[in-house]
Structures are given as structure tokens and as C-alpha cells.
Image (tube, rainbow, N blue to C red):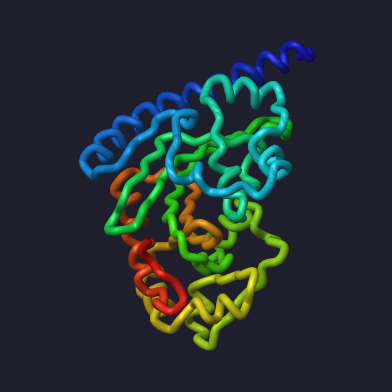
Amino acid sequence: MGLMDDAAADAAGLGAQMIYFKIKNGRRAKAFTKWSAANGFTFWAKPANYDGEIMKLPIADAEAAKARGGRPLGAKARMASRFFGESQMQTRLWAFCTNRFRGDWQTNANIIEGQWNGTLMTAFDTLWFELATQQATEGEYSSVFAHCKSPLPRMIITPGGFLAGLKRLDEGQSANWGYHRITFETNEFNKNWHVTAADEKLAYAFVSQKMMEFLMDHQTDKWHMELSEGGLLISTIFTLKPPKIEKAMNFINGFLQHVDEDLLETRS
């Protein structure tokens, strides 16, 4: 097979992948449109139209914005971009390690935003393509972001165990420079939850006994959380249906309710 044949095969394969995700997200859009209308949320099917609260978060600087959202795209990425559109959401979430290194190119879909039990939430799907390898790989996953105007320590709280470790590896979190493993006096908690933080002193002050008890009570939920400037992010390795999005938002609200009031105002 010659060079032209290889290029044609690559284009056909990528085209089939994009058609699959287009059909999948068309179906998801219908479900989220119905759910949003029933729960007072705003729904954006196209990332280019999203003008919600995440877009109001500050970017690190002009060079960081260019690196995360404005870099030149290769031929396959340009093709995917024309098919799906692009999103600057990852640029606004620059302070979060989670998902930063997933794929060479990302876009978002099925964005919903609204108040859930007193907390402003944004949920969205992310479609990614790994375009630098010999054979392009791709995937799609869901995230839930709880907005918080009060300062949050930079911290990642994930379940313990082998599978959770694989997810951290998939997210490029095997070596988060500047983050330190935090261990607590309770061995059972250290076994079931993996905590890293940029500031150890802040982490120990933030994770109280009642917060550890809450996390232990919800260890079977297996949510991966990251806290940083602007809010709290839950991310998965697969897409979530609306009922599962509700469970994630309920978990976040419960978590925020277990933050000591003298450390953080959990409601704006």
C-alpha cells in the first residue's frame, strides 16, 4: 500500500470515527435537552455557542492560552475541528491537572449549566483525539464542574486501588510536578483514598475528620475530584447519562457541605 493509499485509509478511518461520535452526541443532546428543560438548566449542544460561567474564569496568560487553545492543528485535527468545532474550555481550566494531557486535540459537547441545590454546576462531555501516533485513537468522557468563588487549595482526591491508578495514568497524572502525596493518621482512609496537594499544610487543614468520614461513606461511588482556583472538578473516563450526572452533583454538594465553615464559604 502506497503513501496515498495510507492517507486515504487514515482519512476514511477518522471519518468513520467522527460519524460515530456525531450520531452518539446527537442522541445525547436530545436526552440533555429534555433534562435541562425539566431542571432549569441551560443547554449548549455546540461548544462554539457556550458563553457560560467557565468562560468567565481567568486564563493564566496569553502564552498559556495560546498553548492550550490556539496552537496550530495538524491535518487530522483540522478535519476533526471542522466536523465538531472547538472549545476554549480546557484553556479556562488551565489550573486543573485532570484531563490536561488527554489527546492532542479536544472539544466539548452537551454542555449544561445551572443551579443544583444551591451550587452552580456545569457538566459537559469532552471528545478527544490522539493524532500524533501511527494510528489515531480517540475517546469521550464526561465532567462535572462546581463553581466556587471562595479559594480552594490545589488538591486531587481520587479513589485508591489499581483501577483508579490506571485512570490517573491515563490522565497523565503519574507525575504532577509540585503535588505531594498526603497521608493521614487513619490507615483505612489512606487505603481507600489517594490525596495529593500542592500545599501540604493547606491540605491537612482542609481535609477534616468529618470530610474523611463523608468520603469513607461514599467510597463505593468512585468519583475522581480535583480542587483548584475557580471550583471543583469531577471527571470520568466515559460519558455519563443525566441520572449519573445528578449523582455526581449530589456528591459534590455533600462534599462541600463537609468543608469547615471557617476555611471556606461553600455558597456564594
Where is residue 267 shown, x and y percent of the image?
36, 64
Where is residue 145 shown, x and y percent of the image?
44, 52
Single out the residue that lies furthest toward the right. 3
User: Image quadrant for the C terminus?
Assistant: bottom left
Q: Is residue 224 above or below residue 129?
A: below
Where is residue 197 shown, x and y percent of the image?
61, 70
Between 106 and 60, the residue placed more toward the observer is: 60
Q: Is residue 15 above or below residue 33?
A: above
| Res. 4 image quadrant | top right
Between 6 and 32, the residue placed more toward the observer is: 32
Where is residue 205 shown, x and y percent of the image?
52, 81
Q: Is residue 180 above or below residue 37?
A: below
Single out the residue that lies furthest toward the bottom. 185
Q: Is residue 156 above or below residue 238?
A: below
Q: Is residue 171 left or right of residue 117?
A: right
Q: Is residue 1 left or right of residue 246?
A: right
The residue depicted at 64 percent of the width and 58 percent of the height is 173
The residue depicted at 72 percent of the width and 33 percent of the height is 132
Between 222 and 253, the residue placed more toward the observer is: 253
The residue depicted at 58 percent of the width and 54 percent of the height is 98
> How many tags in the picture?
0
